[in-house]
Image (spheres, helix red, strand yellow):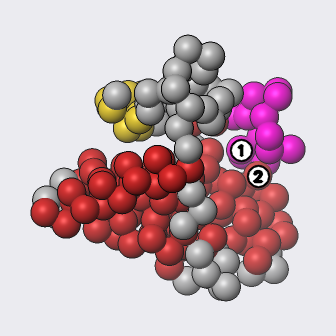
Amino acid sequence: EIYYTIHGEGVRYGVPHVFVRFSGCNLECGFCDTEFESGVEMTAAQIEGMVTKLAERLKANPDDMQGWLMLARSYKAMGRYAEAANAYRKAEKVVMQDAGLLADYAEAIAMGSATGMNGKPRELVDQALKLDAENPQALLLAGVAAMQAGNRAEALRHWEKLLPMLEPDSEIE
């Protein structure tokens, strides 16, 4: 099941997303309402196969921006950051208009490189904040970028702006 939705809770509240629910998924993400007991468990190989099929489908349909975003998110969730960054790059027409997607793209590049938030990731986060100065992920990453650059005061400004947006049980402290 695949559908477009608006995130309804947490730091991504109000952010548009493409939601993919795998039948019988056994990941048991805290935000998902999939009934795990009644489904068939999927192996890592099966999930990998689905992602590979999506990548193959996109070779034949390279203008499918939502497909590229789905592939980028899949690769990112799998820890395949360089491939995720490449998929986000293929969807730049859409990515460059959305603060959340810009932050996701920046994070994928940073996680897949030795330079962290320097260079393109920082540029993408800056662009995200121009589009939406209240985007939680962009604020978080802007703080990380500032710390990496040795600018503690700037990092604190970003993170202090972020703090009121976080839920009390957030993983971010």
Please say whether residue 144 is visible from this viewpoint.
yes
Measured as percent of width and height from the top left, residue 107 is found at: 58, 64
What is the quadrant of the N terminus in the image? top left
Q: Residue at horizontal 30%, vertical 61%?
A: 55
* Residue closest to the eye, 156 or 52: 52
At label 2, counting other C-alpha atoms closer than 10 Å, the crowd grade (few under 14, some 14-19, many 20 or more) is some
Q: CA distance from mark 1 to mark 2?
A: 5 Å
Q: Is residue 81 left or right of residue 156?
A: left
Mark 2 lies on residue: 159
Q: Are marks 1 and 2 in contact (CB under 8 Å)?
A: yes
Q: Position of residue 69 (x, y in %)?
A: 35, 53
Residue 147 vs 131, above or below: the answer is below
Residue positioned 73% across, 71% down in the render: 146
Looking at the rendering, the stretch of residues picked out in magenta corresponds to 160-173
Find out whether residue 165 is within the magenta segment: yes
Residue 9 appearing in the image: no
Q: Residue at x 80, y 44 (%)?
A: 172
* Observer-nearest of 170 and 54: 54
Q: Secondary structure at mark 2?
A: helix
Check if residue 163 falls in the magenta segment.
Answer: yes
Q: Secondary structure at mark 1?
A: helix
Q: Quadrant of residue 154?
A: bottom right
Above or below: residue 147 compared with residue 21: below
Residue type at numbered disc 2: Trp
